[in-house]
Every structure is written in structure tokens, then in C-alpha cells.
Amino acid sequence: MWLKEHSRRTLVERVDFITAPGPTKQGPRLVICTPKAMFEFDHELGELVVAGVFPGVTVDDVVNNMAFKPRVRETLSMLEPATQDELQLLNKLDPGGIRYS
């Protein structure tokens, strides 16, 4: 899942309503990517965990721009920005730029 904004407004502790079932302890695997970090749902804990950050972003920057304090993996991945080839593929799949709206 991609969130185009990483903020206290989009990463909230509780939501007002749920439109689709989320992951359970049995699955499925859930990964959320924002412009700052990547989160994975830990099925044992039942919560999101910071799994990686993009270059130039600190864990403090990630956590301070959320409405809740997530757990952080001991060993974080350093995420790589999308390559030119990957961006071209995204533009081909989404020529209208819906992912930006």
C-alpha cells in the first residue's frame, strides 16, 4: 500500500470508520510505504512496525510525523528511491497520474 503523505493526519492511532478488513494474526502480509518510510504489519504484535527509511530521513523524523509511536525494528533497511526504469513503468501503468491525487 502506498500513502502519498506521511503525517499525523494520515498516520493516526485510531480511525473513525473502517472500509475494509485489515490483516489478522493469520495474514495476509501488509506493507505500507510512505515518502519517508516503509512499515510492515507484525502479525504477532498486531501492529505496524517501522522496517526501513529512505535516504536523508531519520527515525525521529518518521516517528515525530505520526499520531502514534510505532515500534521500530532493531535493524532498519535503508530504502532506495525508485529507479528511472521503475518510474517509467509506473507512468505507463498510471498515465493519468491517479497515484498523485
Image: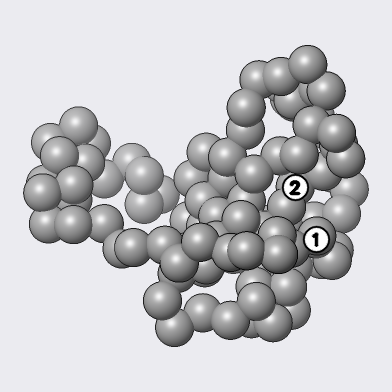
Q: Position of residue 25 (x, y in %)?
A: 83, 23
Q: Could you tell whether 58 is left or right of 60 in the image?
A: left
Q: Mark 2 points at which residue?
A: 48
Classify mark 2: residues with Cα within 10 Å, few (<14), some (14-19) or many (20+). Answer: some
| Towards the viewer: 23 or 20 | 23
Q: Could you tell whether 24 is left or right of 98 in the image?
A: right
Residue under the image location 69 percent in, 82 percent down: 60
Q: Position of residue 64 (x, y in %)?
A: 74, 79
Q: SS of the residue at dot 2? A: strand
Gap between marks 2 and 1, in whole Å?
7 Å
Q: What residue type is labelled 2?
A: Leu
Q: What sort of colour scheme is used for the picture?
A: one colour
Q: Mark 1 points at which residue?
A: 70
Residue under the image location 85 percent in, 63 percent down: 68
| Towards the viewer: 22 or 80 | 80
Residue under the image location 26 percent in, 45 percent down: 97
Sequence-first tag of 2 and 1: 2
Q: Which amino acid does label 1 sit on?
A: Pro
Height in image: 101 above or below 61? above
Q: SS of the residue at dot 1? A: loop
Q: Could you tell whether 6 is left or right of 100 in the image?
A: right
Q: Do the residues labelled 2 and 1 touch (CB within 8 Å)?
A: yes
Q: Could you tell whether 46 is left or right of 7 in the image?
A: right
Residue under the image location 71 percent in, 39 percent down: 41
Height in image: 81 above or below 13? below
Which of the labelled discs sits on residue 55, or is there none?
Answer: none
Height in image: 22 above or below 77? above
Is residue 30 visible in the rendered structure shown here? yes
Count of number-bearing discs: 2
